[in-house]
Amino acid sequence: SALRSAINAGDVCHQWEVVLRSLQEMRAARVRLDDDAYCAGARACLRGRRWADALSLLQQARLERVVPSTSSYGSATSSASGRQKRQHTLQLLEEAKSHRVLMNEGMFSAAIAACETGRKWEKALDLLGQMKTSGFSPTLPVYNMAICACESNDQWLQALSLLAELRLAGLQQIGRAS
């Protein structure tokens, strides 16, 4: 339909206003929206730095009994910053798990970043372990975020253990200015 085309074009062209308006018009016309439409809307909102609107779309999808996909959750978690947004990232991660949505590398990375800045070292280590058991190889930046989460909470043995893992994985630690 023309509105679906407007959603896709708005997503590609970073026009979050067009996407939100098109989604509203489709809902008003009682068109059943699918995950792809909500995902395109969330991506456009995130590109426009409209975090609250992206979360609102995911919430609306759930209310309409549309289960967001890995892509939708990944879009929503990918640009978290600030205290409240970090908490939303971790909540979205738990919600995705409860819907049995498969996690992707970006979701794990965003959640570990939220743990680093939120000083949640135990959760960061748990997520790092989950990432590995899910078949993903953590990258150097992911290890660094987990190490920083440990350092900021004076968990030196954990940080040193992660450094040892880095060496075994053949990765090099990036220095951090204190």
Image (spheres, rainbow, N blue to C red):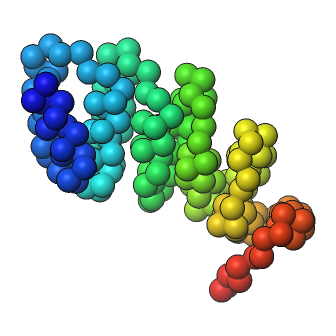
- Marker count (numbered): 0
Q: Toward which corner of the image does residue 158 lie, by quadrant?
A: bottom right
Which residue corresponds to the image point at 35% horizontal and 36% vertical from the top-left? 39
**Near-viewer residue (151 or 176):** 176
Split into 4 quadrants, where in the image is the N terminus? top left
Q: Is residue 114 rendered to the left or right of residue 33? A: right
Which residue corresponds to the image point at 84% horizontal and 64% vertical from the top-left? 169
Residue 24 on image: x %, y %: 14, 29
Q: Is residue 159 rendered to the left or right of residue 178? A: right
Seen in the picture, residue 73 relative to 170 is either above or below; the reply is: above
Which residue corresponds to the image point at 47% horizontal and 29% vertical from the top-left? 69
Q: Is residue 156 visible?
A: no
Q: Is residue 123 rendered to the left or right of residue 30? A: right
Which residue corresponds to the image point at 9% horizontal and 16% vertical from the top-left? 29
Seen in the picture, residue 83 relative to 64 is either above or below; the reply is: below
Residue 142 on image: x %, y %: 67, 61
Q: Toward which corner of the image does residue 166 lie, by quadrant?
A: bottom right
Seen in the picture, residue 155 relative to 65 is either above or below; the reply is: below
Seen in the picture, residue 161 relative to 7 is either above or below; the reply is: below
Residue 42 on image: x %, y %: 32, 41
Q: Residue furthest bottom?
A: 177
Q: Is residue 64 visible?
A: yes
Residue 14 on image: x %, y %: 22, 53
Split into 4 quadrants, where in the image is the C terminus? bottom right
